[in-house]
Image (cartoon, rainbow, N blue to C red):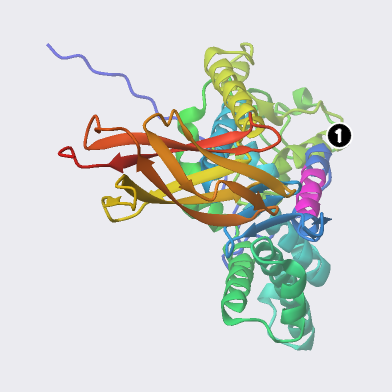
Amino acid sequence: MSEKIPVRLVETFEPSRPKMKAKTSDNQIHTRSFTGLFRTLRLSGAGFLFLAFFGTVWLNWGGRQAVLWDLSESKFHIFGATFWPQDFILLSALLIICAFGLFAITVFAGRVWCGYTCPQSSFTWLFMWCEKVTEGERNQRIKLQAAPWNLNKLLRRSAKHTMWLAISLLTGLTFVGYFTPVRPLAEELLTLQIGGVSLFWVLFFTGATYINAGWLREAVCMHMCPYARFQSVMFDKDTLTISYDAARGETRGPRKRGVAPAETGLGDCIDCYLCVQVCPTGIDIRDGLQMECIGCAACIDACDSVMDKMGYARGLVSYTSEHQLQGGKTHLLRPRLIGYCAVLVIMIGALVLALVERPMISLDVSKDRGLFRENSQGQIENIYSLKVINKTQERQQYTVSLVDGEGFELHGKTELSLAPGEIVDVPVSVAMIADRPSSSSQQISFKVSDSDEPHIHSVAHSRFVAPLNR
């Protein structure tokens, strides 16, 4: 005996009503200008990030560029701290923390990273502002696009692309300036004496900014960004997402200002399509949560402004949860979010501890390729090369010794004086003074310590090889 599963058709919009086309005939989204709380928050956040990105690279610290990832010397300066390739584990930990932070934010409030702080979104909004300045508001831009080429269109388009290229070039120069000193780089670029490698990377990032923010725009968010694909697995019914309250808004329809919805038999939505016209990805939020939504809240600002004019309560489109839309209550504190936050706090604490306890002396040991040799006193010797790095910002005096070196004797230079950030290779030999080795290969440990503060030290291990038939 078989049972039929009941099926019902669910329409996300009224079939009789044509859907609003966000894109024009040129297949381009032309957004409308708007104001509102979330726009102000987004502009403030983006302004701070732009100021940090474009301004930090020009700061000096202790006679050098404050933030510089000097690839040629394998040194990474971040204000008063200098990091070396040996410290890359800290960078890996920082990236993991950022990933967990993104997960926690997504569980709490959806895709707000994309809408407020993502570089692609921020530069896209900036390039859209350039369009508004040079080509006018949305309707003017649509008319200009459809108009035949003439002097007015040529001048406006030229001004727009000039602004785009200027911002892109400044972005490329700034980005490369974090990896090579920016002042000489800018001077070389202005005097056309820039090297081929530097010129390539400046032009590469200039082109990437120009194409991504000027031409691809929402296509990057919708088709190229992997975050859009896996964000749904982090959502739950209590995640705050931008949603349209269909129970309150339907049925949609126009009416005069000040007319109560109950008098017309309609919902609060007046079907003005402003929420579509301000959306940078061109979606209609009233069709439900969609992958293309970047959580920028432009539709909330637009809808709230319309509700204010109509005399209705705000919140027809708002940050809300699925539970709340169904008449329940949003649970902000829940196991998954608490778990993410707990792991995040633990990892941040571990990173801070690792930074505080980071050894300011680095010691690497490499053994000579020869197995062993016999010195003038008839002792078995092994040859080693010690690589010592002074990670501090001051000249330091160091002492080299063996750890638990019973049966062995260290020969070579044991007192070192290193300038800030200096790297030296010290050749030393270790002689076996014991009568008979306990094995053909034994572990030995080298230690380099601060002469004034012996508790500041670094230890590295190697092997000592000797014949058993002495």
Q: Can the viewer see residue 11?
A: no
Q: Is residue 224 above or below residue 164?
A: above
Residue at image position (86%, 34%) is: 308
Q: Is residue 162 above or below residue 79?
A: below
* Of 274 and 16, the residue lying toward us: 274
* Of 392 and 59, the residue lying toward us: 392
Residue 334 lies, in percent from the top left, at: 57, 13
Residue 109 lies, in percent from the top left, at: 63, 29
Residue 65 lies, in percent from the top left, at: 76, 59
Magenta segment boundaries in residue numbering: 42-52
Q: Which three-letter amino acid code belongs to the residue tagged 1? A: Asp
Residue 381 lies, in percent from the top left, at: 33, 47
Q: Can the viewer see residue 148?
A: yes
Q: Residue furthest left?
A: 1
Left or right of 371, for residue 452:
right
Left or right of 66, for residue 447:
left
Residue 203 covered by magenta stretch: no
Q: Is residue 313 above or below residue 30?
A: above
Q: Quadrant of residue 93?
A: top right
Residue of label 1: 308
Q: Quadrant of the C terminus?
A: top left
Left or right of 99, for residue 157:
right
